[in-house]
């Protein structure tokens, strides 16, 4: 009969444990890298969104203001003040602002923040001006404005 060597059995089982432990550690590291890599790769990376172009047919109403869901479009007054658009989202709490034609100002119905037609803050709890958007014009062959294009 061959007697089992207890030292040899303990070395074999230690070797197996070591291999299994290291395998689990490598597997855990690989899993962590697989999960964290996409997160770390795009930390601070922002993909620029494509601009939305919204066309508004000319002429604008007599007031010179077109009220859209996302913005207020002002026709402007000649060369000194070209057409411009400002956001309808108040910078205080995100309420949708309205244009007060009689007062010639933009007012938030929630907390009465007031802004000029250029979106500059006048009063109220809002601390920032309204964001403005670029406006380009489409003209016909005679030079008349046919369409206002707002770049959101």
Image (cartoon, rainbow, N blue to C red):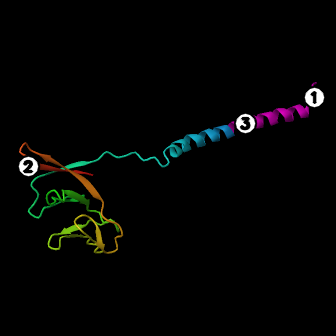
**Which numbered circle lies on residue 20?**
3
Q: Which residues are magenta?
A: 1-24
Q: CA distance from mark 1 to mark 2?
A: 107 Å
- Mark 2, residue position: 144
Q: Is residue 101 above or below residue 133?
A: below
Residue farthest front in this picture: 80
* Between 92 and 135, the one nearer to me in the picture: 135
Quadrant position of residue 125: bottom left
Q: Secondary structure at mark 3?
A: helix
In this image, 134 relative to 26: left or right? left
Q: CA distance from mark 3 to mark 1?
A: 28 Å
Looking at the rendered image, the disc whose residue lies closer to the viewer, 3 or 1, is: 3
| Residue drawn at point x = 48 percent, y = 45 percent | 42
Is residue 43 rendered magenta in the image? Answer: no
Q: CA distance from mark 2 to mark 3?
A: 79 Å
Local packing at callout 2 (Cα closer than 10 Å; few below 14, some 14-19, many 20+) is few
Image quadrant occupied by the N terminus = top right
* Between 124 and 20, the one nearer to me in the picture: 124
In this image, 9 relative to 30: left or right? right
Q: Is residue 82 above or below residue 139?
A: below
- Mark 1, residue position: 3
Magenta: main secondary structure equals helix
| Residue drawn at point x = 69 percent, y = 36 percent | 23
């Amino acid at each position: 009969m061959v007697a089992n060597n207890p030292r040899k059995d303990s070395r074999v089982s230690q070797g197996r444990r070591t291999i299994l432990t290291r395998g689990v550690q490598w597997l855990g590291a690989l899993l962590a890298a697989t999960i964290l890599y996409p997160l770390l790769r795009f930390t601070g990376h922002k993909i620029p969104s494509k601009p939305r172009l919204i066309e508004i047919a000319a002429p604008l109403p007599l007031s010179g203001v077109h009220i859209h869901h996302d913005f207020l479009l002002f026709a402007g007054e000649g060369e000194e003040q070209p057409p411009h658009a400002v956001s309808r989202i108040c910078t205080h709490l995100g309420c949708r602002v309205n244009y007060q034609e009689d007062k010639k100002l933009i007012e938030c119905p929630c907390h009465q923040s007031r802004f000029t037609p250029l979106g500059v803050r006048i009063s109220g709890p809002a601390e920032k001006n309204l964001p403005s958007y670029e406006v380009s014009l489409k003209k016909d062959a005679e030079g008349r404005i046919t369409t206002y294009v707002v770049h959101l």
